[in-house]
Each structure stands twice: as C-alpha cells, then as structure tokens.
Amino acid sequence: MTAPLAMAWLVVAHLAAGTLMVEQTVGPLPAADTATRQPGQPPTGRREQTQFDATRFDSVTANTLRGLFEDAVEMGLPTRPLINRALEGAARRMSSERIIRVVREHAAALSSAKAVLGPGSSEAELDAAAMALRSGIDEPSLTAVRRSRPAGSAVTALVVLTDLVRRGVPRPEAREAVTSLASLPRSDDALLGLQSTVAKNALRGPGMALDALNRYVRGTASGTVTPSTPATTDRKPVRPPDP
Amino acid sequence: MADRDLPVEPLDGFAPDVDLAARLRASYGALPPADPVQVERVTRAVLASAMHASSRRDGSPRPRWWWGAAAAALLVVVVMRPWRPGLSHAEAHRAFPVPSASDGPVGATREERGGAVRFDLVLPSPAAEVSLVGDFNGWDDEATPMVRRASDGTWSARVPLPPGRHVYAFVVDGKQWLIDPLAPQVPDAGFGPTNALIVEGPR
C-alpha cells in the first residue's frame, strides 16, 4: 500500500508545483532542454523529456491539456509535438480555447501521419507529416515520400514538400519533384537546395516558383546543378565546409 | 425595273430577236433588288484583293506570311541568347530582383562546430530587442535573446541544438512574431507560420 500512496503523493506534488513531466514513448528523441543547458555544451544522448510548464496556462486549460497528452500516450503518439504546440500558443498569447483546439487537431494529424508513415516512423517524421497534412497535403503524397525514402529519414523531404506547397507550387508537381530528388544520393542537400531555389524565385512573382522547381529538378537530375545551395539564404552557408 | 434596258447590247451583225429580248426583259425585271449588305461585302472583298496592287506595280516585294514568324524567331534568339545562358540568367535576375533586407526580414542559419547553430536576422527597421523562440527553448521569448552586432546591425544568437528537426521564430520587441521568408516554413496551423530547421550534425 505504501508504494501507491507514495506515487499519489508524487503526482500531487507535481501538480501543486505546476509542472508535469511527460515522457516520450515514440521514436528517437532529440534534446529539447537546451534552455537549461550551458552554451557550447554538446547535446546529451540520453532519453530526453519535455517539460510541460503548466504555469503558463490557467488550471482548467492545463488539466485539459494534460488529458490530451495522456490520450496521446495511450494512442502511442509522441507528446512533445503537442506540448510544443501548447507552449507556442501560450507564447503567442492565444486564447485557451484556441490552444486546446490546435493541440487536439495536431494530435489527430499525428495519428493520421502515424497510420500513413507506419509505426516505425520517428517523432520528427510524424510531426513533419502532421504539419504536411494540416497544410493540405494528401495522404497519398506522404505515402509517396515515404516510399522514396524507405531506409533513411523522410524528415527533410516532408519539410521541403510542405514548404513548396506553401509557396504556391501545385501539389502534384511538388510531390513529383520531392520524390524524384529524395531517391538521389545526398538527397537532403538536393532537397534543401530545391527549397532555397524555389523560395527565392517565389518572391519574384507567381509562376516563378514552379519554373524554378522544374529547372532545378532537371539540372539536378542531369548533374548540371550541384546540390549545395544553402537551406536558408545564399548570403551565408548553412553548413560549414568539410574539414 | 421592268422598263429598263437589258444590261447587254445586241451583237453587231445579228438582227435583234424581239421575242427573245422581250423574254429577257421580263426575266430581268422579275429579279429582286440587290441586297445592300451583299453589295458592300463584295465591294470589300474586291478592294482587299487589290490592296497590294500598287506594290506589285512598283516592284516592291509582296508581304509574305512567314515574315512574322521569322521576326518572332529573331526576337527570341536575340533576347534569350542561347549561346550565352549565363548572361541571360543574370539579366533575368536583375529584372526580377529578390527582395532585400529593406523590404523585409532576412534570416540565415549556420551550423557551427560543437553542435551549435547560429541564427542571424537582419531587420528592415530598428528594434529594441529581438529574441529567438522555438521548440528548443519552450517558446520562451526570454530564454534566448539575440545580440545586435554593431558592425552591420545583424541580430545574432547561438544555440546548441541536437540533430533533428526544429521549429523556430523571431520575436521583435516582445510582441511581433517574424519568420525568415526564405527558410523552410511550417504553415499556419492555428497560431501562425514558423520556420523549420533541420540540423544534420557532424558527418
């Protein structure tokens, strides 16, 4: 009897302190506690936890969110994307109803993403796929991306696909470009180069993004374009040169 | 109309056939009057066919249908200059310039040694404080303040990040959320758009 009582006291103490540690259950987990890590300290390889800071919410909202997180754990979904969505909403000073609605929608998208990508997908893949679904990309497109990267991570492909569609590239053309580049060697570099090229040309007007996409894919496939374009801007390199 | 003469005169050397002439006159008188629209249409067709009669008379060449096609091909070749693709691309870039920092925020990320990522942001207007928020600091706008370099005015922050996908945004003066317009973007799914960063780590 003493063990359950002690556990109950621990839970009560956590709730009273306003914090609840939700442990991840799916996929390899990158660190999320960099706010507490000293600058320059390399990330640890241990199993990380994400802290749900309940003090940012009122008690009703916090309890509702806890319920959503526990439901996610029971469904085998990662909770850290949900906690991040909640914290983002609180940081943007959104209403409680909106935060709960967004977290609930994101949990549903994570569940759909897991069904599409498979149970062996990483947390980052599920989160990226969930955002892709919420941006209007259909499930067959996610399946095509998954098939184009049967062994490696599909995170970059999913991020780039979502970005291309957001910048106005038609979904069929975006899917075709991403899946064709994802099967190349050094595909992440090629995909990030595609994203950078399309992003720069999309600012020049409608139609330029699709034209840039077609030219980049043709050039990359034929080897005339070196897939080394930085991920963000061409003002500074994203990746330092190899030693 | 019935009392009008025939439109043709009798041929010389032939005696006029009164009966035939009377029958022709009757048939000619029974014809309906000409339609003015038809008359105008026929007149236009005749004038159009005779439009280049003067050029034929003075020896100048007649316009040909392929002159337009040749001019279009020449224009395409001169403008695109397929033998100098670099120059054409440069002119196209000048014609459609990428927005600079004066038009909006310009950001950049760079992986550094030791598992850290440097975030840079150039703002189009002055700001008192800029902070970096993301899933790596719990979206706390006080956790990662950015430092302004006096040399070029770039706001910068260095954050140790593990390999993987990270989502971030910039907060200007504690209230305005900005994203890098050129970096990979996470769509607005309830709160507003953010940027995505994929850290690959050491190779």
Image: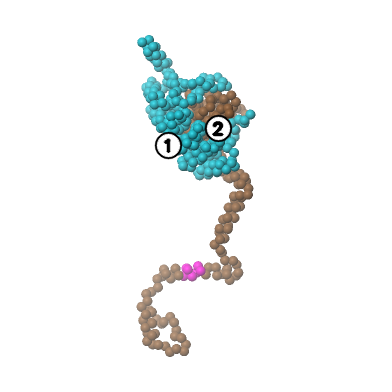
Q: Secondary structure at mark 2?
A: strand
**Residue B105 or A237: which is nearer the viewer?**
A237
Badge 1 crowding class, 10 Å Cα cut-off, few under 14, some 14 to 19, many 20 or more, is some
Query: Position of A6 compared to B146: left or right?
Result: left
Task: Give the dominant element type of the magenta stretch: helix, strand or loop.
Answer: helix
Residue range in magenta is B43-49
Query: Residue at 60% of width from left, 67% of height from top?
Result: B60
Inspect the image, locate mark 1, and give the three-letter code of the amino acid beneath it. Answer: Glu
Which quarter of the rendering shows the N terminus of chain A? Answer: top left
How far from the left and from the top, in percent, is residue B144?
Answer: 53, 24
Q: Quadrant of residue A83?
A: top left
In the figure, the cyan chain has which letter? A
What chain does badge 1 belong to?
Answer: A
Residue on which the image places disc 2: B107
Residue on which the image places disc 1: A139
Give me the C-alpha separation between circle 2 and circle 1.
32 Å
Look at the image and give the colour of chain B.
Answer: brown
**Residue B177 or A210: which is nearer the viewer?**
A210
Q: Is residue A16 magenta?
A: no
Q: Which mark is residue A60?
A: none
Extreme-top residue of the structure: A2
Q: Is residue B46 magenta?
A: yes
Query: Residue at 47% of width from left, 87% of height from top?
Result: B12
How far from the left and from the top, in percent, is residue A113?
Answer: 43, 32
